[in-house]
């Protein structure tokens, strides 16, 4: 007989224990996706990964308490690493990669379209939108901000800060070892020559 290829996958005590009806859910670990009822195309691997998710779809959590408190209809979130995106509740389309990413400082709860990569990469507002922080302890401290480098802080709306322990406050400007007040496009054009 041919083995059945549909149905949820659950491994671990209380994994998918909340009355799950999704045939596409995968939960591995103690209380992984424990509250899931109908969240489709979700994968949770780790102790309490995606534990509070009920109906949110297309989410991926890998690591101890990754995306643990996500609930409701939160969709398209990815959390990889110990406590990555742990505090997210109804946020959407976020990517957290690294231990504590999105869960340090002011943790993201409702924000969307954020990319936080690195140990404790963070934002300054729970509802942050379209922020990018790349590097250990990097911080995109305002909407549309980009922080690249360990300890970097992009503080202004739409600001860009590049380089270790740098700070940027002006929109469309680059802050780094060689500070510049020129527009980003001019700095890039002159750098590429």
Image (cartoon, rainbow, N blue to C red):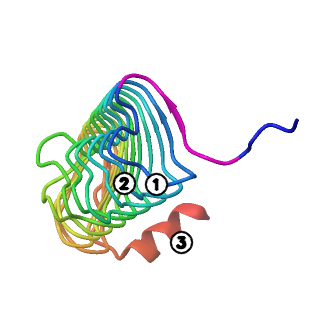
- Residue 138's spot in the image, x, y percent? 27, 44
- Looking at the image, which residue is at 33% across and 37% down? 66
**Which corner quadrant holds the C terminus?**
bottom right
Question: The N terminus lies in which quarter of the figure?
Answer: top right
Q: In this view, does 34 lie above or below 139?
A: above
Q: Which numbered tag is attached to residue 189? A: 3
Q: Would you name the residue on which mark 1 appears?
A: 21
Q: In which quarter of the image is residue 120?
A: top left
Instruction: Give the label, 2 or 3, closer to the camera.
Output: 2
Q: Quadrant of residue 143?
A: bottom left
**Which x, y percent locates residue 93?**
40, 63
Q: Are marks 1 and 2 in contact (CB under 8 Å)?
A: yes
Which residue corresponds to mark 2? 37
State the image coordinates of residue 145 (x, y, percent, origin top left): 28, 65
Cβ–Cβ under 8 Å for marks 2 and 3: no
Choose top left, top right, bottom left or bottom right for residue 83. Answer: top left
| Sequence order check, earlier mark of 1 and 2 | 1
Dot 1: within a 10 Å radius of its alpha carbon, few (fewer than 14), some, or many (20 or more) residues?
some
Label 2, residues with CA under 10 Å away: few <14, some 14-19, many ≥20: some
**Vertical side of 124 occupied by 30: above or below:** above
Dot 3 falls on a residue whose secondary structure is: helix
**Reading the chain from its start, which is encountered first: label 2 or label 3?**
2
Residue extending farthest right: 1
């Amino acid at each position: 007989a041919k083995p059945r290829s549909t149905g949820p996958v659950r491994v671990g005590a209380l994994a998918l224990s909340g009355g799950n009806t999704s045939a596409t859910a995968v939960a591995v670990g103690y209380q992984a996706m424990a509250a899931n009822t109908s969240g489709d195309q979700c994968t949770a691997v780790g102790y309490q990964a995606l534990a509070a998710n009920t109906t949110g779809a297309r989410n991926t959590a890998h690591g101890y308490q990754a995306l643990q408190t996500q609930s409701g209809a939160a969709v398209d979130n990815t959390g990889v690493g110990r406590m990555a995106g742990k505090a997210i509740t109804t946020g959407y389309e976020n990517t957290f990669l690294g231990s504590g990413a999105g869960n340090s400082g002011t943790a993201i709860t409702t924000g969307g379209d954020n990319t936080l990569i690195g140990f404790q990469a963070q934002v300054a507002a729970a509802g942050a939108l379209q922020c990018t922080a790349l590097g250990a302890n990097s911080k995109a401290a305002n909407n549309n901000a980009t922080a690249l480098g360990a300890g970097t802080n992009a503080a202004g709306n739409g600001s860009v800060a590049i380089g270790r322990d740098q700070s940027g406050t002006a929109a469309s400007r680059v802050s780094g070892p060689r500070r510049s007040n020129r527009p980003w496009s001019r700095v890039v054009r002159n750098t590429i020559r």
